[in-house]
Amino acid sequence: MIAHFNSSWCARVRRDDLFTMQVDGSKGSAVVGLPRLLDSALRGTPRPVWNPDIPSAINYFDGWQKVPEQDTFDNAFKVQWELFLRHVVKGDPFRWTLLEAVKGVQLAEKGIESWKKRAWVDVPPIA
């Protein structure tokens, strides 16, 4: 399986959305953006003959289908901000503590370490 994430605040967008994630597997592919999910099954994948001297006769966008929505989700940034404000004003619990932030930094650092070593690395628990 191959996963590709593409998100940038400073790049010129040449895709459907500001954020896209594509996952490719042996039986198909899926692309998710902010508002939708598309999939392309193996059975519908075109079999082109690659010839760089002529334009492709295949419209590759035609092989993708929108996955029907099953749930509606609110804006995650707004929801987390509202939870934080409830925590500040009403004293409601807030799950993203300093410890959770430390875990996030640790995970990012372990990802870089794994990439540099080209190997799996252990992520030790933080108390």
Image: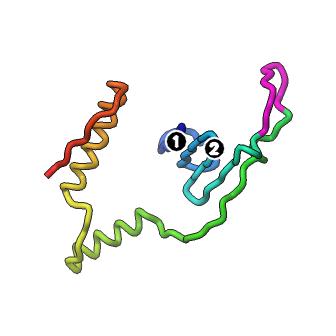
Mark 1: few/some/many CA within 10 Å (<14, 14-19, 20+): few
In this rendering, is residue 80 above or below 120? Answer: below
Q: Nearer the viewer, residue 47 or 105?
A: 47
Q: Percent position (x, y) of residue 23? A: 56, 44
Report which residue position mark 2 lands on.
Answer: 15
Q: Residue at x 58, y 60 (%)?
A: 35
Q: Percent position (x, y) of residue 107? A: 29, 43
Kind of residue at badge 1: Asn
Specify start and end residues of the magenta stretch as a single range.
46-56
Q: Percent position (x, y) of residue 28? A: 65, 45
Mark 1: secondary structure: strand
Contact, mark 1 vs mark 2 (Cβ under 8 Å): yes
Q: Quadrant of residue 99?
A: bottom left
Q: Quadrant of residue 118?
A: top left
| Residue 48 falls inside the magenta stretch | yes
Furthest-left residue in view?
127
Report which residue position mark 1 lands on.
Answer: 6
